[in-house]
Amino acid sequence: MVYSYFDLKREELIKVLIKSGIRDEKVINAFKKVRREYFVTPELKRLAYDNSALPISFNQTISQPYTVAFMTQLLDVKKGGKILEIGTGSGYQAAILCELGADVYSVERIEHLYLEAKKILHDNRYKVKLKCSDGTLGWREHAPYDGIVVTAGSPELPDTLVKQLAVGGKLVIPIGDRDTQEIWQVIRVKEENGNEFLDIFKHKNFKFVPLIGKEGW
């Protein structure tokens, strides 16, 4: 078998992710299948498998592969599970979720990015339901979701997104100021008499672009 430059770089990245603590075999296999070079700008393709965030259009980024893997691992995606992504960006996270067998819904507030991601995902045969809207408000029509992943940093936990989680569902979201955030894993344990009961686990020292919208910045 002949391996391309990108095939070899992808294998190198997988080793870095495993060494960094990514243990979920399903997540690792998804990263082996998704071609990150298709989700970065042409001039940065040579850097597609560096373990670093890269700029895309409109001052947004495609997240560091480790961060994507870490958040996906926390999401604990089950095959056939309904997952909502807030912040489509170039579509890379959505593609990873598709490879995990999820039923993926994704919301992007910037129309240009929404259109670009729609084309990239379609060209690579990833079936993602896409919407151009304020992601902080989620996508109520298709709720509840088994998981929600937010790819931008929020000043606080958006109540609307919590309410769109199924009982037992997980919300993975960066929370903090504009400079640094913790990634929160929020599990909706139950709802009783109009009150939410949540388990929250926090993981420090991450940095994301700000979550812009009614319930963000």
Image (cartoon, grey):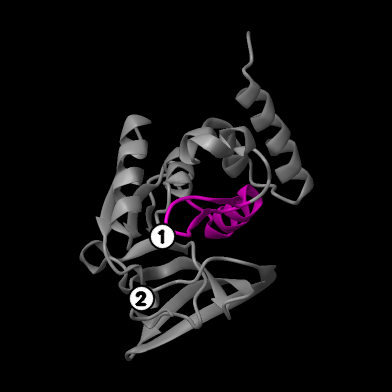
Mark 2 neighbour density, 10 Å: few (under 14) some (14–19) many (20 or more): some
The disc labelled 2 sits on which kind of residue? Gly
Is the N terminus in the top left, top right, bottom left or bottom right quadrant? top right
The residue under the point 68% across, 30% down is 9
In the rendered structure, does residue 41 fall within the stretch colored magenta?
A: no
Vertical relation: 112 (above or below) 205: above
Q: Residues within 10 Å of mark 1 (few under 14, many from 20)?
A: many
Q: Is residue 5 above or below residue 134?
A: above
Per the image, label 1 sits on a secondary structure element best described as: loop
Q: Is residue 116 left or right of residue 142?
A: right
Circle 2: element type: loop
Q: 29 or 121, which lies in front?
A: 121
Query: Residue at point 41% right, 60% down?
Result: 87
Q: Residue 50 in the image: x percent, y percent? A: 68, 41
**Label 2 belongs to which residue?**
213
Image quarter for residue 164?
bottom left
Image height of 162 relative to 15, above or below: below
Which residue is rendered at x = 60% and y = 38% of the image?
48
Residue 73 picture quarter: bottom right
Is 117 placed above or below 125 here?
below
* Residue 52, percent from left and from top: 66, 49
Q: Is residue 160 left or right of residue 202?
A: left
Which residues lie in the magenta part? Answer: 53-77
Q: Which residue is mark 1?
A: 87
Question: In the rendering, at what x and y percent does residue 80 appear?
Answer: 37, 46
Quadrant placement of the C terminus: bottom left
Dot placed on the residue nearer the N-terminal end, 1 or 2: 1
Dot 1 and dot 2 residues touching (CB under 8 Å):
no
